[in-house]
Image (cartoon, rainbow, N blue to C red):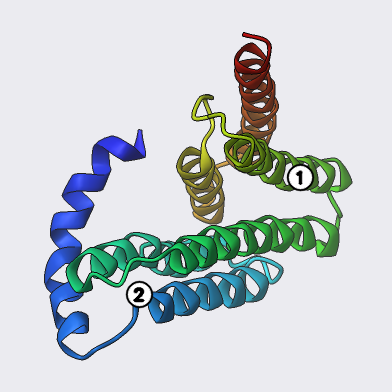
């Protein structure tokens, strides 16, 4: 889904990328700033119950995940280290979003423990989705399949949290349950895909 939108977003980000390139700003710096912004805003706004404001700020910093790629292509500074750093910090950013929601559910006047557990499952399942792909590629295989890649997972959780912050009832719970199921299915899909390659 996000791959369809990526070219349009890239065109919007290109002028900013040019400005940053002229100032000699490294893509790695953009990656680090984006992750720091996601972590700080998720762990500040979400536990306090400011779901809509938090989602807006997080979304702003998530866009840095596209900006660093644009900047790397413009400057020719793309590297294996940059790719490794980007993937690693993506995991940190994702973990902070779900951790912020877990704290939100636990710290409420009437704690929602079940939803906290679902959010924890989403966090673990999302990490496993990424690990399966990385491990497969480390073994010379591929695992680029599944219904819930990182981009889709981010869209679901941020849209659900943002709408919940605007007062839409049950949307956050529905989004988390949907995401938990989709992430579990994606893990199975990727494992099956790797298995077929391994036994052929």
Which image quarter is the C terminus in? top right
**Residue 43, quarter of picture:** bottom right
Which image quarter is the N terminus in? top left
Q: Is residue 182 above or below residue 33?
A: above
| Residue in the picture at 17% in, 48% down | 8
Q: Nearer the viewer, residue 29 or 182?
A: 29
Residues tagged 2 and 1 counted as in contact (Cβ below 8 A): no
Q: Nearer the viewer, residue 170 or 122?
A: 122
**Labels in figure, total:** 2
Mark 2 vs mark 1, foreground winner is 2
| Residue in the picture at 54% in, 24% down | 146
Q: Outermost residue toward the bottom?
A: 23
| Residue in the picture at 45% in, 70% down | 57
Q: Is residue 128 above or below residue 59?
A: above
For label 1, the residue is: 124
* Residue 71 percent location from the top left of the image: 25, 70
* Residue 7 percent location from the top left of the image: 19, 46
Q: Is residue 104 left or right of residue 134?
A: right
| Residue in the picture at 42% in, 76% down | 28
The disc at residue 11 is none
The disc at residue 27 is 2
* Residue 29 percent location from the top left of the image: 42, 81
* Residue 67 percent location from the top left of the image: 30, 66
Q: Nearer the viewer, residue 83 or 42?
A: 83
């Amino acid at each position: 889904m996000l791959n369809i939108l990526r070219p349009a977003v890239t065109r919007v980000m290109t002028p900013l990328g040019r400005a940053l390139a002229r100032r000699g700003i490294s893509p790695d710096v953009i990656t680090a700033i984006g992750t720091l912004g996601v972590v700080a805003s998720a762990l500040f706004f979400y536990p306090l119950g400011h779901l809509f404001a938090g989602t807006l700020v997080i979304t702003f910093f998530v866009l840095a995940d596209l900006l660093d790629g644009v900047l790397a292509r413009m400057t020719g500074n793309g590297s294996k280290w940059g790719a490794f750093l980007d993937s690693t910090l993506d995991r940190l950013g994702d973990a902070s979003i779900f951790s912020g929601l877990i704290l939100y559910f636990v710290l409420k006047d009437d704690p929602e423990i079940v939803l906290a557990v679902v959010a924890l499952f989403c966090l673990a399942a999302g990490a496993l989705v990424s690990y399966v792909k990385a491990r497969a590629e480390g073994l010379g295989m591929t695992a680029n399949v599944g219904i819930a890649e990182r981009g889709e997972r981010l869209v679901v959780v941020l849209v659900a949290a943002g709408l919940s912050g605007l007062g839409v009832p049950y949307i956050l719970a529905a989004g988390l349950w949907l995401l938990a199921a989709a992430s579990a299915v994606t893990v199975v899909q990727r494992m099956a895909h790797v298995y077929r390659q391994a036994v052929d």
